[in-house]
Image (cartoon, rainbow, N blue to C red):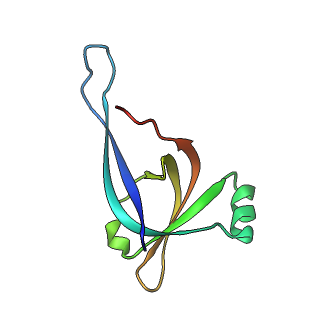
């Protein structure tokens, strides 16, 4: 497991700001993962349910996952579609909807 992914937590404020919006805060934390491809069978089964899985990541310990809904990898941000805990306590995270992450300078 030598790739790094960033698990993203998004929090929406319960108070309105001066523009009348509820501010959104994103926090990220990095963990090591193994990148795997989506198998043909898994891809087509997901497509029948309207999902488009793109990449699968495996993290060493399922306890490292805290219910995040997004992750970032190689400059793209993905929606987490599914998680699966293996018998060896690893966690497979299947993602889709990759969009180029905007880098603020």
User: As drawn, is 29 to the left or to the right of 95?
Assistant: left
Q: Quadrant of the N terminus?
A: bottom left
Quarter of image, res 68: bottom left
User: As drawn, is 28 to the left or to the right of 1?
Assistant: left
Q: Residue at x 25, y 19 (%)?
A: 17
Above or below residue 26? Residue 86 is: below
User: As drawn, is 22 to the left or to the right of 98?
Assistant: left
Q: Residue 32: horizontal and vertical position, in percent? A: 38, 67
User: As drawn, is 92 to the left or to the right of 55?
Assistant: left
Q: Residue 34: horizontal and vertical position, in percent? A: 48, 71
Which one is nearer the viewer's eye here, 62 or 3?
3
* Label total for image: 0
Q: In which quarter of the image is the C terminus?
A: top left
Farthest residue to the bottom: give it: 88
Q: Which residue is drawn at 74% across and 68% down?
A: 40
Q: Residue at x 38, y 58 (%)?
A: 67
Q: Which residue is drawn at 31% across and 55% down?
A: 29
Above or below residue 53? Residue 13 is: above
Which one is nearer the viewer's eye here, 104 or 57?
104
Farthest residue to the front: give it: 105
Q: Residue 53: horizontal and vertical position, in percent? A: 63, 57
Q: Residue 8: horizontal and vertical position, in percent? A: 37, 50
């Amino acid at each position: 497991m030598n790739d790094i992914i960033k698990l993203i937590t998004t929090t929406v404020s319960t108070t309105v700001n001066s523009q009348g919006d509820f501010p959104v805060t994103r926090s990220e934390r990095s963990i090591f993962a193994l990148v795997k491809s989506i198998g043909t069978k898994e891809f087509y089964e997901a497509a029948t349910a309207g999902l488009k899985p793109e990449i699968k990541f495996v993290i060493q310990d399922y306890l490292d996952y805290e219910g995040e809904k997004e992750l970032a990898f190689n400059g793209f941000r993905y929606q987490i579609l599914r998680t699966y805990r293996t018998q060896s306590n690893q966690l497979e995270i299947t993602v889709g909807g990759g969009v180029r992450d905007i880098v603020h300078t």
